[in-house]
Image (cartoon, helix red, strand yellow):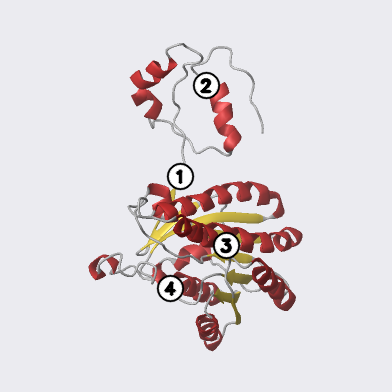
Amino acid sequence: MSIDLKGRTAVVTGAGGGLGRSHALALAKYGARVLVNDMSAQGAEAVAAEIRAAGGEADSAACSVTDRDAVAAMIDGVVDRWGSIDILINNAGILRDRTFSKLTLEDFEAVFDVHVMGSVIATKAAWPHMREQGHGRIVFTTSSSGLYGNFGQSNYGAAKMAVVGLMQTLALEGAKYGIRVNCLAPSASTRMTAGLYSEEDLKGLSTDLVSPGVVTLAADDAPTRVILLAGAGAFEQAHITMTQGIHVGDAPDAAEQIQARWREVGDRTRETAPDSGSAQYNHEVRHPGRANAPARIDA
């Protein structure tokens, strides 16, 4: 099955180097017109020039994803020039790594502003265009730090899990408009990982080995509501699941029952990945262990 992105327009944020550059080049290789965004005008234009030199179509735009007016103008400019905004890769990011006791609130806010609000701002600008045209592919960049935790990255991990929640809801809201929304959790050697890992650890973690996943998530037959993990040429999926659990109702010793039956609460046999938040409520009010359970709730 071949992937053809000819006629599609992509915007990749934070694409002046590292993962963003690899994503931009990969999308262009499959025929997409690419707007390369970065804080560095020189970096963004260098990548756009690479694409054009290889026979592709590309332009560059220098702005911070936290600058609402600049991002809106960038997205509107893409639509004015190429007629659509079909693919948005929210890749821009920063690090402020410190243990929580040493982390300042400013460090927390700075990371949230770029990773979370930057993704929201770019997506908000692209969303109405995608709704109107009945097609859109949005990728948020999450991380194993958010999914599983990482020492010294409470701010980064919290921000990266926040975009997973954003993805989950936007995938539901975008479905009837042909907008498919996913997350990518990359493992790669970039300037953001410089000094964090040894050269030996980073061997084989080329950013180019991650970007095929982005191409897949940008394709016309892309999935939606997927957390795709990628690194060193390997690809996996992560799932936020719910166990079957137990039902104790309003028993006066409910806390003690939970404690005593903790293994049952956490038993992963027949665990599920709920379709939406209301699926949790439906499971709980209609739990197999509950007598006279009410009918399904749709919310």
- Residue 263: x and y in percent read 34, 25
Q: Secondary structure at mark 4?
A: helix
Q: Secondary structure at mark 2?
A: loop
Judged from this view, the residue extending furthest toward the left is 200
Compare marks 3 and 4 and give the one earlier in the sequence.
4
Residue at the spot of label 2: 287
The residue at the point 48 percent across, 17 percent down is 289
Count of marks overlaid on the render: 4
**Residue 271, quarter of picture:** top left
Residue at the spot of label 3: 118
- Label 1 Cα neighbours within 10 Å, binned few <14 / some 14-19 / many ≥20: few
Residue at the spot of label 4: 18
Judge depth for marks 3 and 1 and give the one in front.
3
Judge depth for marks 2 and 3 and give the one in front.
3
Residue 36 in sight from this viewpoint? yes
Compare marks 2 and 3 and give the one earlier in the sequence.
3
Compare marks 4 and 2 and give the one earlier in the sequence.
4
- Label 2 Cα neighbours within 10 Å, binned few <14 / some 14-19 / many ≥20: some
Judge depth for marks 4 and 2 and give the one in front.
4
Q: Which mark is residue 239?
A: 1
Q: Secondary structure at mark 1?
A: loop
The residue at the point 57 percent across, 63 percent down is 218
